[in-house]
Image (cartoon, rainbow, N blue to C red):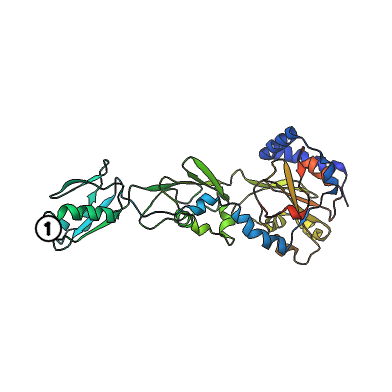
Amino acid sequence: MNRPLLVFLGVSIFVLQACTSLTSLQAQNAQAGTDMSAGSRFTPVPITSEIIAASARADALANIPSELIDYEPEAYRIGPGDALFITVWDHPELTIPGGSQTDPAANARFVSEEGTIFYPFIGKIRAAGLKPDQLRQALTSKLSRLIDQPQIDVNVLEYNSQKITLTGAFSNPGYLPLTASPLSLLEAVSAAGINEDKADSSKLLLIRDGVTYTLNYAGLINKLTPVDEIYLRAGDRLHLQSADQAKVYIAGEVDAPHALPYTGTAMMLSAVLESLDASFTSSFRSRDLYVIRDDKSRSSEKRVFQLDAQQPNAYMLADRFPLMPEDVVYVGAAKIDNWANVLSQLFPGAHSTEGAEQVSHLD
């Protein structure tokens, strides 16, 4: 049921003209060069419930660098700009100099840019870099010269010194303060909100100490992963990529090759089925869908996943198979004899990764 080579050439011309990112990829692959003779015996990986289930955790874990999971936040340390409320029990003249009717915030002690606070009868005392309990001990030591066994509490009223930055396709980009309660990645994203119309949730960048980590946030939250164990620290920046440029390409035996915006929020293969016209839907049983994807472990190679349209649960499987940006969904015969021909037309110079045993995850 293969179509003539002209069909493939037409598909290739459309992709080259319409898809800038795909054109760049083709140029890179052409420079790399490859022997496509192995493609003729290439076997796509079937999309089954077992493949999807087995890959789910491995796929997500592969996207979480170990250094992010291993980071353990320490107790909060006071910094410049923080507002402190210091209680000296049984000494309201020190705790609330303005009287009991005064708003506690009016009696806050702000940490200066130098990292110090001024306290009556003590003068300047360093606060920056100390945990609240350490400052309490320092104040107790100094006040004990004036007060017998002073009982002191130190609380942070306003957390202003340590922040994380949120930029990109968040609903509420800006800053989030770090407080005495550790801030997790999940909490930060939830607080900022995701702009579902603009965001590519498969590309959440965490920039820390000059190192950029790319996380598939949509994949992490939809699978059993330790994403809740990723904690943020002062100076971290979260940038959520826009989906404006991310696309999924549709080619092969369709009326016209085209591209779909990649929604990023758990976009499934079923979205492609829903985008195809009625003529394809009526003949779906005589066609298969092939998802052609970059093999991240081999820069010039491709993986191919095959959805068998003859299966009664084909749509259900499609609704569980996650797509990635720049995937090419190829509509073709239930059996393609020469994958070298197909891949060489779509991706000049691309390799084909053979065998289901090589697939440990879908990403």
- Residue pushed farthest top? 31
Give amino acid for label 1.
Answer: Ile
Task: Please tell me how many numbered marks the rendered image carries.
Answer: 1
Residue 266 lies in quadrant: bottom right
Q: Is residue 298 left or right of residue 208?
A: right
Q: Position of residue 139 (x, y in %)?
A: 20, 53
Residue topped by disc 1: 147
Q: Position of residue 192 (x, y in %)?
A: 45, 53
Res. 156 in view = no
Q: Is residue 300 left or right of residue 213?
A: right
Q: Quick check: 187 above or below 7?
A: below
Q: Position of residue 77 (x, y in %)?
A: 33, 51
Which sits in the foreground, 164 or 54?
A: 54
Residue 101 lies in quadrant: bottom left
Residue drawn where x is 58% and y is 60% of the image: 222
Which sits in the foreground, 291 or 351?
A: 351
Q: Quick check: 148 above or below 27?
A: below
Residue drawn where x is 67% and y is 63% of the image: 53
- Residue pushed farthest bottom? 312
Local secondary structure at mark 1: loop
Q: Is residue 162 left or right of residue 149?
A: right
Res. 130 in view = yes
Q: Position of residue 99 (x, y in %)?
A: 13, 59
Residue drawn where x is 79% and y is 43% of the image: 343
Q: Is residue 136 left or right of residue 353?
A: left
**Other residues around mark 1 within 10 Å, as few (<14) / some (14–19) / many (≥20):** few
